[in-house]
């Protein structure tokens, strides 16, 4: 793994108001590193989905629980870990939102979107929380 020249850890309470703090964090990164506009919005959507899943599905909007956001960045890649304090989940039980029987469901697209919009996503569910690690390449090299 590359050495990172920018690292930051931010702790959020599991409440809807915390969701508005993600976009400014990413705009700060966009100022520091070269991220093409279209790719930036892919990253914004993917991180917002991961963060919302942590607050809503993982921590069940319990303000006593936290979501930890860990950001590591260099000139080549950005790695963001989103960790909640929920009960974990079975990744294999997530249904494909493209299947006809799932098209009209109100939820179930977050993980699909995350995987579709960025360069890599790893999910580490456990009994004391889930960590989602997002990988976003800043260069084509």
Image: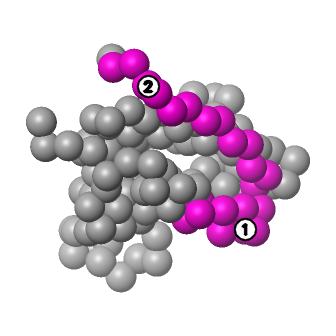
Q: Residue furthest left?
A: 141
Which segment did they paint magenta?
A: 2-24
> Where 36 falls versus 82 (above or below)?
below
Please give the label number shown on residue 4: 2
> Where 81 falls versus 97 (above or below)?
above
Quadrant including the N terminus = top left
> Where 88 falls versus 39 (above or below)?
above
Residue at 84 percent of width and 54 percent of height: 63
> Where 61 falls versus 75 (above or below)?
below
Residue at 54 percent of width and 56 percent of height: 28
Q: Nearer the viewer, residue 48 or 86?
A: 48
For mark 1, does the 10 Å Cα neighbourhood hold few (<14), some (14 to 19), or many (20 or more) residues? few
Q: Between tags 1 and 2, which lies in front?
A: 2
Residue 23 counted in the magenta span: yes
For mark 2, does the 10 Å Cα neighbourhood hold few (<14), some (14 to 19), or many (20 or more) residues? some
Name the residue beneath numbered marker 1: 16
Residue at 30 percent of width and 77 percent of height: 103
* Quarter of the rendering containing residue 16: bottom right
Quadrant including the C terminus = top left
């Amino acid at each position: 793994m590359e050495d990172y020249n920018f690292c930051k850890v931010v702790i959020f309470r599991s409440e809807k108001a915390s969701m508005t703090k993600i976009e400014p964090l990413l705009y700060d990164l966009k100022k520091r590193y070269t991220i093409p506009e279209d790719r930036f919005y892919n990253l914004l959507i993917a991180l917002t989905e991961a963060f919302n899943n942590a607050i809503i599905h993982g921590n069940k909007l319990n303000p006593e629980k936290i979501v930890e956001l860990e950001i590591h960045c260099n000139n080549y890649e950005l790695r963001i870990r989103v960790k909640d304090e929920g009960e974990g989940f079975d990744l294999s039980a997530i249904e494909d939102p493209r299947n006809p029987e799932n098209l009209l469901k109100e939820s179930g697209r977050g993980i699909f979107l995350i995987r579709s919009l960025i360069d890599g996503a790893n999910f580490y569910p456990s009994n004391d929380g889930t960590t989602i690690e997002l990988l976003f390449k800043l260069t084509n090299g």
